[in-house]
Image (cartoon, rainbow, N blue to C red):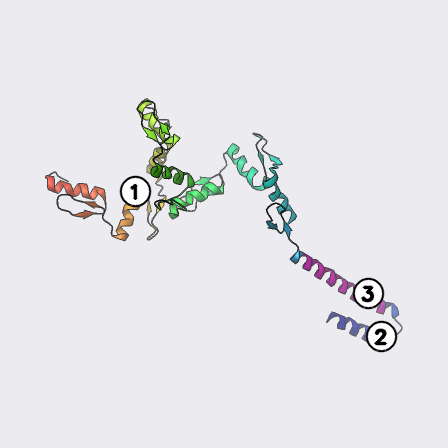
Amino acid sequence: MEEQLCNQKNSSLNQEDPNLPHIKKEEEEVCNSQEGEQLVLKEETDTFMVTSLKCDICEKTFKYNSEMKKHYRIHTGEKPFSCKMCGKRFISSSSFLLVHMRTHSGKKSLTCDFCGKSFKNKYNMNQHHRIHTGEKPYSCETCGKSFYVSSSLKSHKTTHTGEKPYSCKTCGKSFTQRGSLTIHMRTHTGEKPYHCKTCRKIFTCSSHLSVHIRTHTGEKPYCCKTCGKMFTYRSQLFGHIRTHTGEKPYHCKTCGKMFTYNSHLWRHMKTHTGEKP
């Protein structure tokens, strides 16, 4: 199309004034230049479309040379970026090093959309999200029970094997995890290292403190997938879910009446004993 346009321009130019040969020459040069640029552009486009970079070790492909160089460091172990605070080295500066620097600055840039809690990296936030969504991607091959994190699954598997490698030297009680033993030892020592900054109440383990803090903040991290209602404690969520399923696991041994909540059963039991509810 452009070639025809150029020819038409040259033809009309010749008919209008045959005494201007230098203008004709310039027009031809412009047309040839445009054709040349289009040809180069087409060649570059074709080259970009067919070119792919492949890792010699694992044959993974990449679009850009910079991506492949970064990937090679996984195989070679090269870590060219280091933390100025502690000297720890990393493969990439744009992700690993920047995330690590927050451990020194205390900066928490990622926020949970459900409860507003902040996190230092995306990995921890994604794990936290599962509390709200109920997602449990790690399941036991033996019994099918699912867990939020892989470490919980690992600990659970010991319930099938019976393995309890950590034992208390004071009373001989054994545990599947070292952390459980550490917490247990505080029952002998009376140590309560975790305290609430609001009311100064002290606790044996950090998880008990975390649950307690919700009484001050009003945080409700457990969400019902059916109706969206939020709860402060996991046990409250489980009890609420039964209102949707109709499950009543608590029954009165005296009259056989069934209840959704254990507290409702205890209240009912007083009608048999004569105790005022």
Residue shown at the point (84%, 69%) measured from the top left: 24
For the residues marked 2 and 3, what is the alpha-carbon distance in whole angstroms? Answer: 16 Å
Where residue 97 appears, as percent x and y from the top left, is 56, 37
Where residue 238 appears, as percent x and y from the top left, is 30, 46
Residue behind mark 2: 14
* Residue type, mark 3 in image: Glu
Residue shown at the point (38%, 37%) measured from the top left: 155
Element at badge 1? helix
For the residues marked 2 and 1, what is the alpha-carbon distance in whole angstroms? Answer: 93 Å
Residue behind mark 3: 29
Q: Earlier in the sequence, mark 3 or mark 1?
A: 3
Answer left or right for 263 relative to 130.
left
In front of the other: 9 or 173: 173
Quarter of the picture containing the N terminus is bottom right
Residue behind mark 1: 235
Q: Which residues are magenta?
A: 23-47
